Every structure is written in structure tokens, then in C-alpha cells.
Image (spheres, grey):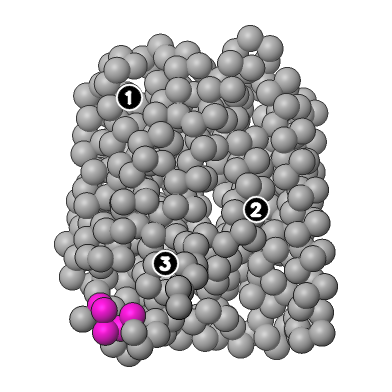
Amino acid sequence: METKKIPLMTRRLLLFMGTMILANISGQMFMPLLPLYVQELGADVGQVGLFFTIGAVAPLAFQIFGGWLSDAIGRLQAIAIGSLGGLLGYIAYIFAPSWEWLLIATVTGAMATSFVSPSYMAFISEESAEGARGRVYGMSHALFMIVGIVGPPIGGYISQYYGFRSMFIVAAVLYSAATVIRLLMARDAARATSETSEKPSFTQLKTSLAAMGGLVLAGGIVTWIFISDGVRDVTFNMAFQLLPLYMQNITGLTNIEIGWLSSIHAIVTMVLLTPSGWLSDRKGERLGIVLGFGLIAAAMAVFLNSKAFLGFAVVWALFGFGSALIEPAYNSLISKVVPMKLRGTAFGLFSTSIGLISLPAPYIGAMLWERFTPRLPFYFPLFATLLTLPVIWIKFRPKEEELLGVDEKARSQMG
């Protein structure tokens, strides 16, 4: 008797990934260029840093709630709610008369990110088998990389020849189409679970946060994920919002060239994500995480010595290679050490807590640029990454009692 082979990715997961691709093509049309749009609307470098610092406050108001709501009412339902907030954000981007008004767009757009992001990670985990989770994460992220290949060049072309507002109109149309599909999927999911689901309550939220707080403070692998993420997030946010300004204002790259750099990153990441997921399943998560961050450190070193498009292309290729190694391994590791019923809350709590720590980082980076040299902010992520590599190698090896999301068969395979 033949055994029917179960596909790695379910039909529902593939449809879900289709909506993620459509929505995030629109996002990637403008995100690599957003600092330039803020500058076009009258901001100087210091005000660009201030804009992203203030803008970082908005997601903090939604992330824990969005992650918990994902656990409470369902992944697809939370994504649908966030998508409606995202639509309001696009309207604000189109009609903002000055850079200060763009802060309204960051507030409404933050609802989309805060509701969709934790649900995205948790939904993939629930739609995949334990022994193949790294591969499923790798394949999902590989499909997702289409957005980085297609979106930035389109955004760069439209913004350069037709203006930023025209670019936002096109992006809003794509996002609207994804939102309609998400609403239909959420409706079907709600019908399937309405009889058995509990209504969300404040008591459930407090219970979930208390459980996650216990994991973070326990001194185990979740604690070290939190600490290492915090160090990197602070230093990366000091520099990464300034990348487009540095490449255009200092080295003379155009919007189109900056868009193509994002595509190079996405292409390399897409090609390598599935084999990276396999590496995570076979050799353990920490190997891919360490190798990935080592490549990102190398990319920053090359960036500091690049003066033309070709050099920056190498940088973004290394960023892509590093991201491909990190993403499936990181998500697979979190799915193993956080119980399924808390995964949405976990992603929301990590993002909010780390976001609070790194809140002033973009403004600090801009001040270092203006008061010392434009190169100075980019040294911080390089050195921080190198310092955290030994910590990751030593601490990112879960103990038996920490494998909360792993079945017995998978435990035996891990040795």
C-alpha cells in the first residue's frame, strides 16, 4: 500500500503566502526609499533620524496586543484587522503635505506590521511538521523574497520619473487587493472555529504576558535571544535608516540604483533560503545563525570601504546570504522553545521590548553623522555583531527542558 506524500507547504499556506507577497511588494516599493521621501518633504539628516525615532513609538503600542490577539482570535483574523490599518497608512502617505504629517502614516501602518508580523511567523509554524519546520520556514521566506526582487526597482523607477506620490498610489492599489483576499480568508477561518473558540479577555492577556515574562527572565535560551537581539537592534537602527542617505548624498547613487540593491539582497536571499532551512533542520539552528551574522559583519566592513555601485552590490549580496542563513534558523529555534499558544505573544513581546530599548537609536545615529562623520554610525553594527557571535554560539543550544514545542521523535533526531 502506497503512503501518500504530504507536501511541505499546504494549500492554505500557499494562498496565505500569496497575500503576503502582494501586500509586501507594495511595502518594498517605498521602504528602501522612505528616508529620501522624508528628506524631499523638507527634513534634514537630523530630522530624518528624529522621524524614524518617533515613528518607532507607534508599533510599540500595538505589537504585544497584536501578538496576543493572534493567539486569542486566530492568525488570519488578526492579519485582516491589521491590513485595514495598513490601508489607512497608504492614504496618509499619499496626501501628507510635509514630513511631520508622515508620522500619521507610521502610526496607522504600524497596526498592520504589529498584527501581521507575529501572526505570519506563528501561522507558518502551525502549518508545518516539526521535523521539516526549518525547510518550511526557508521555502516560505524564499517565496516572500519575491517582494524584495520586484518591489524596489518598481518603486525606484516610479519615484524617479513620476514622483513619490504616484509610487504610493500604485502601492496602495496592490495592498488593497491583498487586503480583500485576507478578509475572505479570515471570514472562512472564523466560520471554521466559531463554535470552539473562546472570546479574548484581559485575563487571557495577563496570563500570556506572565508566561512569556517567566520565559524571558528564566535565564535560559529565551533570555539570551532577548539580550542578543536587543544589542543588535540598537546598533543596527543607528545605521540602517541612514543607508539610503549615505549612498545618495555621499556616493551619488540614484533611486533606481538603490532599488536594485534591495533586489540583489532579495535574489540572493531567495536562492539560499531553502538550503539554509535544510541546514537548520540537519545541523541545528545556532550554526546558521552564527554564520549568518558573521556574513552581515563582513558586509558592513565592505560597506565602509565602498564608493561605487559595484561595491555596494557586493554588500547587499552578503546581507542577503546572511539573512538567508539566519531567518529559518531563528524562527525554527523560537518555535521549539516557546509553546504554540504563546508564539504570537512571543513575537509581539520581543518586538516591543527590544523596540523600547532601541527607540532613540535612529536619532543617535543621525547626530553622530552630523556632529562627527557620516561614516561613524555604520561602525556600531559591525562591532556589536562581532561581540555577540561567541554569545550566540555558547548560549543558543536549548536544553532538554526548554524544547517546549518539539515532539519526542524530533528530540531523538536532535541528539
Disc 1, SS: helix
Q: Residue at x 74, y 54 (%)?
A: 182
Using the image as rendered, state which of residue 368 and residue 227 is in the foreground.
227
Residues rendered magenta in the picture: 410-414
Judged by depth in the image, the label closer to the viewer, 1 or 3, is 3
Q: Which mark is residue 133?
A: 3
Q: Is residue 100 visible?
A: no
Instruction: Using a 10 Å C-alpha cutoff, classify the residue at mark 1 as few (fewer than 14 neighbours), some (14 to 19) or many (20 or more).
Output: many
Q: Residue at x 59, y 22 (%)?
A: 154
* Quadrant in which the N terminus is drawn: bottom left
- Image quadrant assignment for residue 295: top left
Instruction: Using a 10 Å C-alpha cutoff, classify the residue at mark 3 as few (fewer than 14 neighbours), some (14 to 19) or many (20 or more).
Output: many
What residue does disc 2 label?
A: 15
What residue does disc 1 label?
A: 313
How many numbered circles are shown?
3
Q: Residue at x 79, y 56 (%)?
A: 183
Q: Residue at x 55, y 68 (%)?
A: 127
Sooner in the amino-acid sequence: mark 1 or mark 2: 2
Q: Mark 3 to mark 2: distance in Å?
A: 18 Å
Instruction: Using a 10 Å C-alpha cutoff, classify the residue at mark 2 as few (fewer than 14 neighbours), some (14 to 19) or many (20 or more).
Output: some
Sooner in the amino-acid sequence: mark 3 or mark 2: 2
- Image quadrant assignment for residue 403: bottom left
Q: Is residue 226 above or below residue 269?
A: below
